[in-house]
Structures are given as C-alpha cells and as structure tokens.
Amino acid sequence: MKKLYFLIVLFFPFFTLAQNADSTWFVNNYVKKEVSIPVRDGVKLFTSIYQPKDQSEKHPILITRTPYSCAPYGKDYRQYWRSFMMKYCREGYVLVTQDIRGRWMSEGKFEVVRPFNPDKKTNKDIDEASDTYDTIDWLVKNVENNNGNVGVTGISFPGFFATEAALSGHPALKAVSPQAPVTDRFFGDDDHHNGVLFLMDAFDFHVGYGFSQPHPHPSTLPAKTFNIPGNDNYAYYLKMGALPNFTKVTGDSLEFWDNMMKHPNLDAWWKARDTRSGIKNVKPAMLVVGGLFDAEDGYGAWNTYKALVKQSPATNSKLVIGPWYHGQWASKDGTHLGNIMFYNNTADWYQNNIEIPWFNYYLKGKGSLDSISKASVFFSGENKWRKFKEWPSADITPTPIYLEKDGKLSFSKVANTKPSFDTYISDPAKPVPYADQVHFNRTREYMTDDQRFAARRTDVLVFETDTLTQDVTLGGPLVADLMVSISKTDADFVVKLIDVLPEGAPRNPVTRYPMGGYQMLVRGDIMRGRYRNSFSNPEAFVPGKPTQVKFTMPDVAHTFKKGHRIMVQVQSSWFPLADRNPQQFVDIYHAKDSDFVKETINIYHDQSKLILPVLK
C-alpha cells in the first residue's frame, strides 16, 4: 500500500500538468458557439459547436447527437481534454454536440426510440434521420471554414442516433460510427433479452434515472428522477414483487414504460422500433463498435453490423469488438474487466489504430485503411486481436457439446437406452442472483464474474468437460438447444458458458482475487420458454411433456486454453437482472404476487446441448 501511495504521489503532478497543458491548448485554439438549428417542421435543436481558430486549412465536422445533454451550457467549455476526444482536437476537427428533439435545451417532443420513417411526404413527417439531415445541412452552410465532410459518432443511445444519421442520405455525410448502438429493445438491449424484461436496468434507467420522463420545455435542468431506496438490489427488487407494483411507482407520465407493459410480445409496435428495419442502401462508410462484455448493449453492435452486411451489402462497413464493458473503448484503460486481465491497453490501441485513422481517412483524406480489416475482434482467453474478412467467419464449424449424466459435458453424445434428466426446483421467492456480492447498482463486471457462487446452489445445474488437452477457440453466435419438461405452464431458461481456470492459477496481480478454479462467465443469456416457437404468439407448456427450447445467444470470441475446462450452467432465474417468471402462463406484466409458484424443472441429457461456433 505504501508503494502504491508513493507512485500516486510521484506521478500525480505529471498527470495534472498534462491535463492542464491540454486544457490550456484547447481554450487557446478552440472557440465555442451555441446555436439553435431549425429543422423542417419548425422545431429548433440546441447545438454546441467547438470550432478550431486555425484558418490555415478547412476542417471536418464530427457530430454527436445525444439525449444526455450537450452541457455545459453558456461560456464554460466541454472538457474534451479529459478524454481521447482530445486527439480529434489535435487533428483540427469541428466538434458538434446536439440535444436531440425534446431533450434538455431542444424543442419538440421526445420519443425514447423514434421509429424511422422511410416514406416522408411533408415537412411534418420527421424522424431522427430527418433531424440529422437538417442539422448537417445547416452546419455545412453556416460553420466557417469547414471542408464539407461530416461524420457522426456516438455510444449507446447516441449510437442509435448515429445509426439513424446514416439513414439520412445527406451527401456531406461521409462516415458514421454507431458504437454499442441501441438496436432492438425487445431482443437484446437494456430493456429486454429475448422478450424477458431486464428489470433492474429498465426500471433504474427509465424510472430511477428518469430517462423516459417528459421534458416538455427547453431546460438546462434534468427531468424528474425517482430515488430507489436501499443498498441491496436483490432485496429491494424482490420485496417490490410483481411488475404492477413497479408500474404504480411510475405514475402515468412514463409513456415508454406504459407501452412496454402493453406490449409484452413481439408486435408491430416493437418491430417499428427495431433500427435494423431502416438499414438499406446506406451511403456513408460505417464503423460499428462494441464490447464483448457490454452489459447494456452487447446485442446491438453484432446485429447492426450483420444487418448492414445483409441489407446494405454495397456499404463499406467494418466491425470492431474488443474485450470491453459499455463504452470502455473510449476510456483511457482497456487492460482488464473485473478480475479478468487482458494485459494490454486495448482501448488506447483501438483509438490510435482504428477509430481516429478511419475518420481521418474519410473526413480529411489522410492516411490509409489498408491495416483495418473488415472485422477486428479481440479474443478473450488468448488475449489477442484477430482480423477477419467477414463475420461470422467462414472458418467456423457449428459443434454440439452435450449435457450428460453426472454433470458431464461432452463433445460426444452418449447413447442411452432410456431418457434421463437432471432436476431442480425453481422458486420465484428465492431466485438465483446474477452476482455474488451485495450491491445496489447493477455491476458491469458481472459479464466476466466468477460463477462459483451459483454452482453451489441446488437450483443451478452444472455440466463440465474434462481438462482440455488442446485449445478450443469459439468465434460467432452461440446456440442453446435444451430438451426440458416442467411441472407448470411456463419457465425461463438461463444458459451460461463458462471458462474454468486451472486450480493452480495464480491470484489476480491487481485485485488479489483467487483465480485457481475461477469460473469465468464467457456468455450468458435468458430465454422465456413461452416464446420457444414464436415471440409473437406465446404458448403454454404442457406439464410433464418433453419440449425443445432453442435460442441464439450473442456472439462469443473466446479461447478456452489447454489445461482449462468448459462448463455450462443452467438455471431458471437471474435476479434482479431479469424479471421473475410466475411459472404460470399468465400476463407477466399484469401478474399478481400470488401468481408466483414453485416449479420442478427437468433438463434431459444427450438431447440438451450447446452448439459452439468452433473456429479452425
């Protein structure tokens, strides 16, 4: 501890001097302007413009449209010198941040995920793409000394607005980078996974943080928030009970929450809010970025890129996936996540070798893209970047690994003369926690957490291979294919793919966590059984009848090293990450506390498997 303190004291003045030097340079070389840009229906969008004073050359424009505020407002400067965005400043970019329609200082009505409108006929037919078009048009005509080339970037919800920008069709828009983009809030973003409400994220975001609160008048003040009491999220969410108890807290002002409660199944309302529906004939170059371990939007990057390849094949699209939590690629440290070390600063490498060169090429005509492959993906386990001509790679072989008797996991199916299964009791009153520790905010580290705490529970089934004699590398979508029978009429199924480290593995050098036997979560996801045949037309189970539940999980990029073991865990709750299933075929969004019942669940051997994307 004394050594660490000494190093902090020794180097802190140098960090401070560097920051002060950057902030001084920025203030001396940039000027800030605030404008309200009129769009086609008369609404004005508040916009902050940071413009280089340099007149020796013309400068490209880089836009971020955000629901999270383009503060600070007034004379104070956005502190770009505290982030890697300072590298863009050194390159002479005009940096533009805009409050989207209906948020903060912009006029108009806010909609959480405004559907793309491909058939605009009048000036009243607006969407986020048209707002972006009109913004770009104003900027290239009114920002002094710009070079006529525009890019758009953004992380998370700003990533959604970046995707919508790419659909605007403005000729000045040359390059767009949706990063962890909100894409489909029914199948895989913050609000739902495979139709299962991600309770903690959805409630905390829409209600606690107040994201969905109306913002009817331009204001520098945040919308109304809700103070979620307590320090133990498991206890709080369990005590709250059925979902109608949460809805009572929202009152009648949260339109998006109310709509989620009215649309439990996949229908036209959800389909209109799938951003992939508009991805056709995209003109600007696209750089889609995401994290292997992104707890918020781990679905969006993979699937936005796949939609571009399939629906807009002429677009010059590239994919980058690193070993990151939500937005970690824009941080100053990409060396680790929780107890899992990556041993090099992946964030800094990405910024210097991919993102900035990519924008420079399209917006400044500078450099080359020869070193940037179609897909650049970091593989955890082996901790290295791999380059691909396509994703998923043509070199993957879908390979089943079977759940067998006695907790065995095998690449060879065992022939049994009589069906056999493992059994557990799923009790909604005591759901399986998603993480071990007591905490209140949902952790980002759960995506790589040690799963030994779950393996010790009687309502979690554990299957494990023998020690691997050679490396096994997976790269692509993971498929869970279970044969189950249940004693009631509905159930959820959580499947987790886990890398078990050798018993002799040394402690983590930073956290000192015991890594011997560590069960690293590589990928986990949940499936609501009622949707096994259709997300639009749910079906009850027949009690006791063997039934297939098959679903695709987000892509993986991981190497199980020789000497490790592969593990699969199966359970029926993941709380309070996912809302609880009453385990009866009722409307869960309007269920009563009395609807929740215990259930016996059987997972059949041999017929239950994971289909692994084994990379040659």
Image (tube, grey):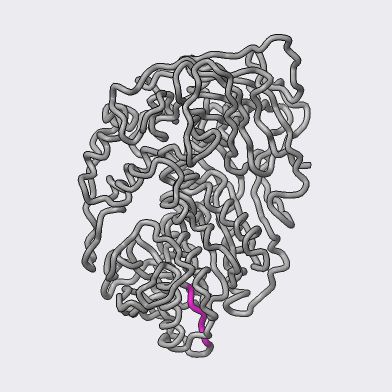
Residue occupying the point 45% across, 47% down: 267
Residue 487 x/y as whole percent: 47, 16
In the image shown, does 550 or 440 lie closer to the viewer? 550
> Do we see residue 603 in this rendering?
yes
Query: Is 372 contained in the magenta span?
Result: no
In the image shown, does 52 or 243 lie closer to the viewer? 243
Residue occupying the point 30% across, 78% down: 42
Residue 427 x/y as whole percent: 40, 18
In the image shown, does 315 or 97 lie closer to the viewer? 315
26 with respect to 73 (left or right): right
155 with respect to 587 (left or right): right
Residue 404 x/y as whole percent: 67, 17
Locate the C terminus by quadrant: top right
Residue occupying the point 33% across, 67% down: 101
Locate the N terminus by quadrant: top left
Residue 472 x/y as whole percent: 73, 34
Q: Which residues are magenta?
A: 58-62
> Do we see residue 526 in this rendering?
no
The secondary structure making up most of the magenta span is strand
Residue occupying the point 37% across, 70% down: 98
Give the mark count. 0
Quick one: which residue is furthest to the top in this view? 418
**Quarter of the view holding residue 96:** bottom left
27 with respect to 336 (left or right): left
